[in-house]
Structure formats: C-alpha cells, structure tokens
Amino acid sequence: MMTINNEVQKPDDATLIIKRMLNAPPERAFRAWTSAEHIQQWMRPEPGMVIPLASMDLRVGGKYRIQMKKSDGEFCTAVGEFREVKAPERLVYTWAMEKDGSGAEFGEVEGKPSLITVEFLKRGERTEFVLTHSRFASVESRDNHARGWGSAVESLAKFVEGRNNL
C-alpha cells in the first residue's frame, strides 16, 4: 500500500484525519493543493486515475470542481464551496460528488456534502499537512475516502518535494 508515510486517524464513524510531513514549505504545498493546473498533475486517488478537468475559484464563497476519471472510464467528480481561505495556512470547504460527473460543467450532486479542513503548518523548512474530512454519511464512505486520500496525499508529497514542479 502506498500510504506508508501518512498517519491516518478515524476518531469516529464520520471523521477521517490524515497527517503527513512534507519536505516543502507551506506556500509550496498550499499552491499545489489549490492550483487547478497542479491538481491535474498530482491528484491520484487511485492508480491509473487522471484529472481531465479542474477549476478553482479560491475565495470564500468560491466554488471548485475536480473531475476524476478512472482507468475504466468511470467519472468521479468532486465539487464544493470554499468556506475559509487563509493562504498558506488553512482551507475549509465542502465536498460532494456529482451524480454524473462526465460533463464539463457543474452538475447535480448526490447526498449531503461533507466538510474538509486542510492545514499547512510550518515546521521549520517543512510542512505538517493535516487533512480533516468530516460529516461522512457512512463508515463505508469514510473508509473509501481514507484509501483515496491516502493515495492522493502520497502523490501530493512526491509532487511538492520535486523541485521542478512548482
């Protein structure tokens, strides 16, 4: 499994916390996490998954959309709204999946949105990355996201620690 360097916590049935030390400053990690162009390069929740489209309106009330395409052609498209933007330290935003994420525009979402808080804590020249994903509808959803986020955070670490990417 790829998530060897991540610390994963499941404090309750509806919450997931993933922590990772990144060998990069918070500014670099924040930029990678919030740039649509960078997200298309590093986000890999599953092997073989690609990001055909990503959009980020990085401001309170701004919306984002990340269209993920699995190797079998199925789309998983995440959408939400930024609730708090404090660069380069903290983001809070909603997270929901579109029913049919194959289009180029925002579509209808399924279920109630969950909530994500991402912290980029300066630790000398490094960053303590803390992702807290809460308000999951089920333990199954939390555990599926634990696998996806684990893989994505591993990819993020490799991306921000590479010197040519940002």
Image (tube, rainbow, N blue to C red):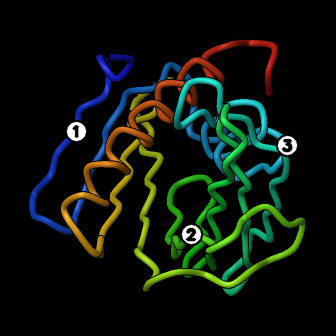
Q: Earlier in the sequence, mark 1 or mark 3?
A: 1
From this view, report whether residue 71 is shown above or below residue 114.
above
The one of 52 and 11 positioned closer to us in this rendering: 52
Measure the alpha-carbon separation of dots 1 and 3. 27 Å
Kindly identify the amino acid type of the residue bearing the numbered disc 2. Answer: Met
**Residue bearing the label numbered 2:** 97
Q: Residue at x 45, y 39 (%)?
A: 122
Q: Residues within 10 Å of mark 2 (few under 14, many from 20)?
A: many
From this view, report whether residue 51 is shown above or below residue 133.
above
Q: Earlier in the sequence, mark 2 or mark 1?
A: 1
Q: Residues within 10 Å of mark 3 (few under 14, many from 20)?
A: some
The one of 22 and 152 positioned closer to us in this rendering: 152
**Residue bearing the label numbered 3:** 37
Measure the alpha-carbon separation of dots 3 and 2. 20 Å
SS for tag 1?
Answer: strand
- Between circles 3 and 2, the one closer to the viewer is 2
Kindly identify the amino acid type of the residue bearing the numbered disc 1. Answer: Val
Kindly identify the amino acid type of the residue bearing the numbered disc 3. Answer: Glu
Which residue is most to the left?
A: 12
The one of 38 and 14 positioned closer to us in this rendering: 14
Q: Residue at x 35, y 38 (%)?
A: 147
SS for tag 3?
Answer: helix
- Between circles 2 and 1, the one closer to the viewer is 2
Which residue is most to the right?
A: 104
Q: Residue at x 81, y 14 (%)?
A: 164
